[in-house]
C-alpha cells in the first residue's frame, strides 16, 4: 500500500500552533457485536447503512461500491477505483479474546504495483483496535493529527491491514510509512489466483500480538478498502461477507 501524501509543512505548523490530538476513538457500548453481512441484501439495493462511507482524503474522489451477485447468486460488494481512495467501514464492539477469528472472502481482478509500492493492493480489510493514543510516541501522535486534518477522521489506537500483495511473501508484516500503529499483513500474493474467490480466515488476536508485541484492546471497526492512484487504469475487486467467530 502506498500511504496518503501529507502536507510537508503541516507538522511545523501544528507544533508552532500548539495543536493537540482530538479525543481518541473508544469502544461504543451501543455498537453491534457482529458484522452485518452483504448477502442478506438484494443485488442492486443500497449497501447496508451500517457499512458507512470511509473517506481517506478530502483531495481524492471516493471509490465506487455497489451490491451485485456473484457466480453462485450470492450478494457481494463490487468495488471500482480509478485514481480514487475510499472504503466502507462498520463500527462494532468485539472482544478478540472471545471471538478472535475474522473470516471473509474476496476476489481481485488485477494488481497494480508501482515502483514506489510493490504491494499496492486492490483489496484490503482493515481491523481497528481501541487504546490510549496519548501513550503513543510523539511521532505517531503527530501523524495522527496530520491525518485528522487531511481526512477529517481520527485514526484508532492501532490497526491491522490485511492485503493481497504482489511480490512480498505471505505472512510478511510491514509498518505503514508514517506510523508504526498501522501494520500491513500480506495474506495473499501474486497473480496466480486473480479472478477467483479466495476464502481467508485470520486470528486477529494472534496477528495483533505478533505485529505489535502487546495485547489488543477491543475491535472497534472493520473496513474494506479498494484504492488506486492511477487515474488511467480502472481496478475492480469484490468482497463477500465478513464475520467473527471463536474459531478452534
Image: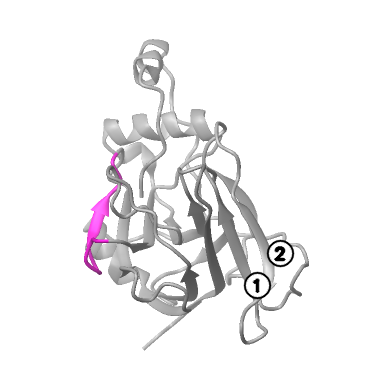
Indicate the quadrant containing the C terminus: top left, top right, bottom left or bottom right.
bottom left
Q: Is residue 155 left or right of residue 45?
A: left
Q: Residue at x 40, y 14 (%)?
A: 13
| Residue occupied by mark 2 | 48
Q: Position of residue 77 (x, y in %)?
A: 62, 67
Q: Would residue 126 be counted in the magenta stretch?
A: no
How far apart marks 1 and 2 lie (CA) works out to 7 Å
Q: Which residues are magenta?
A: 167-177
Q: Is residue 141 left or right of residue 148?
A: left
- Characterize the magenta stretch by its predominant secondary structure: loop
Q: Residue at x 38, y 76 (%)?
A: 193
Front-lying residue, 89 or 168: 168
Q: Position of residue 138 (x, y in %)?
A: 28, 31
170 shown above or below 7: below
Q: Position of residue 18 (x, y in %)?
A: 40, 15
Q: Position of residue 150 (x, y in %)?
A: 50, 30
* Circle 2 SS class: loop
Q: Which badge, 1 or 2, is on the more N-terminal residue?
A: 1
Front-lying residue, 142 or 133: 142
Marks 1 and 2 in Cβ contact (< 8 Å): yes
Task: Give the color scheme: rainbow, by chain, secondary structure or one colour.
Answer: one colour
Q: Which quarter of the picture shows residue 40?
A: bottom right
189 shown above or below 234: below
Front-lying residue, 242 or 46: 46
Q: Residue at x 29, y 71 (%)?
A: 206
| Residue occupied by mark 1 | 38
Amino acid at each position: 500500500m502506498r500511504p496518503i501524501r501529507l502536507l510537508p509543512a503541516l507538522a511545523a505548523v501544528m507544533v508552532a500552533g500548539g495543536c493537540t490530538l482530538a479525543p481518541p476513538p473508544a469502544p461504543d457500548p451501543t455498537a453491534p457485536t457482529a458484522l452485518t453481512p452483504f448477502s442478506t441484501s438484494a443485488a442492486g439495493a443500497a449497501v447496508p447503512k451500517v457499512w458507512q462511507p470511509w473517506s481517506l482524503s478530502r483531495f481524492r474522489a471516493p471509490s465506487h461500491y455497489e451490491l451485485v451477485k456473484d457466480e453462485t447468486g450470492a450478494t457481494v460488494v463490487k468495488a471500482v477505483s480509478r485514481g480514487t481512495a475510499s472504503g466502507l467501514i462498520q463500527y462494532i464492539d468485539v472482544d478478540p479474546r472471545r471471538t478472535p477469528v475474522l473470516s471473509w472472502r474476496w476476489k481481485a481482478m488485477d494488481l497494480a504495483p508501482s515502483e514506489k509500492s510493490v504491494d499496492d493492493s486492490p483489496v484490503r480489510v482493515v481491523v481497528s483496535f481501541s487504546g490510549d493514543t496519548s501513550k503513543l510516541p510523539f511521532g505517531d501522535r503527530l501523524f495522527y493529527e496530520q491525518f485528522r486534518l487531511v481526512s477529517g477522521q481520527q485514526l484508532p489506537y492501532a490497526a491491522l491491514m490485511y492485503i493481497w500483495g504482489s511480490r512480498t511473501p505471505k505472512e510478511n508484516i510491514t509498518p505503514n510509512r508514517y506510523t508504526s500503529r498501522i501494520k500491513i499483513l500480506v495474506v495473499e500474493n501474486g497473480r496466480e489466483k486473480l479472478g477467483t474467490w479466495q476464502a481467508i480466515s485470520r486470528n486477529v488476536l494472534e496477528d495483533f500480538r505478533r505485529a505489535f508485541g502487546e495485547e489488543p484492546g477491543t475491535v472497534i471497526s472493520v473496513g474494506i478498502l479498494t484504492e488506486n492512484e492511477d487515474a488511467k487504469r480502472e481496478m475492480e475487486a469484490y468482497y463477500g461477507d465478513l464475520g467473527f467467530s471463536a474459531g478452534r
